[in-house]
Image: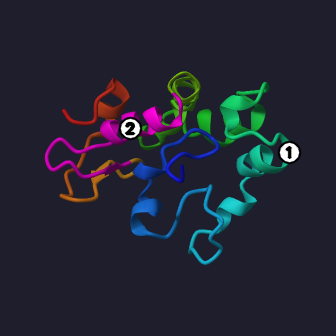
Amino acid sequence: MELFSYCGLFCGACPSYHRGTCLGCRSEDHNQKRTSKWSCKIRKCCVNEKEVLYCGKCSEFPCKKISQKLIDSHPTDLRFYYRHEIPENINELNNMGISKWIDKQRGKWSCDKCGGTICFYEYTCKNCGKKINPKNYKKGTLNE
């Protein structure tokens, strides 16, 4: 469950997760390097205010918090396109369930060259170093 964030992002494709500096926003390990998650407004809202498993279980989704911070952020920068598909991720989470969604995300962020993980924002395979053009991601495929 640690690969699934409150906001609907797949932590398994996050560069910080692969560097080992972040264990995902669901982790309670306060010894990890990235501790900014505990001040994240989205995490606080899900955990402390709404008491929901993730944003998609909230009747207010998509709210101003998640729209401003993620969904509508950096509209012309392809490196951040993964954020713009949060509504689609949430819809899939609601329809597929968490474990099937995680399996789908693992496949989506998998390198066709070596099977390693392609990280969002960097669009580079962490295993073989293959670079992916973010435009391909926006077209719906990473491996072209």
- From the viewer's perspective, tell me whether residue 107 is left or right of residue 46: left
Asked if residue 110 is among those painted magenta in the image, a careful observer would answer: yes
Residue 58 in the image: state x and y as whole percent. Answer: 76, 30
Residue 143 versus residue 1 in the image, above or below: above
Q: Are marks 2 and 1 in contact (CB under 8 Å)?
A: no
Determine which residue is flagged by label 2.
103
Asked if residue 130 is among those painted magenta in the image, a careful observer would answer: no
Compare marks 2 and 1 and give the one earlier in the sequence.
1
Question: Dot 1 lies on which element?
Answer: helix
Residue 8 versus residue 93 in the image, above or below: below
Q: Which residues are magenta?
A: 97-119
Which three-letter amino acid code belongs to the residue tagged 1? Glu
Residue at the spot 34% in from the left edge and 33% down from the top edge: 137
Residue 9 in the image: state x and y as whole percent. Answer: 53, 42
Which three-letter amino acid code belongs to the residue tagged 2? Asp
Name which quarter of the figure residue 50 lies in.
Answer: top right
Residue 139 versus residue 74 in the image, above or below: above
Determine which residue is flagged by label 1.
49
Q: Give the mark toward the camera: 2 or 1.
A: 2
Residue 64 in the image: state x and y as whole percent. Answer: 76, 33
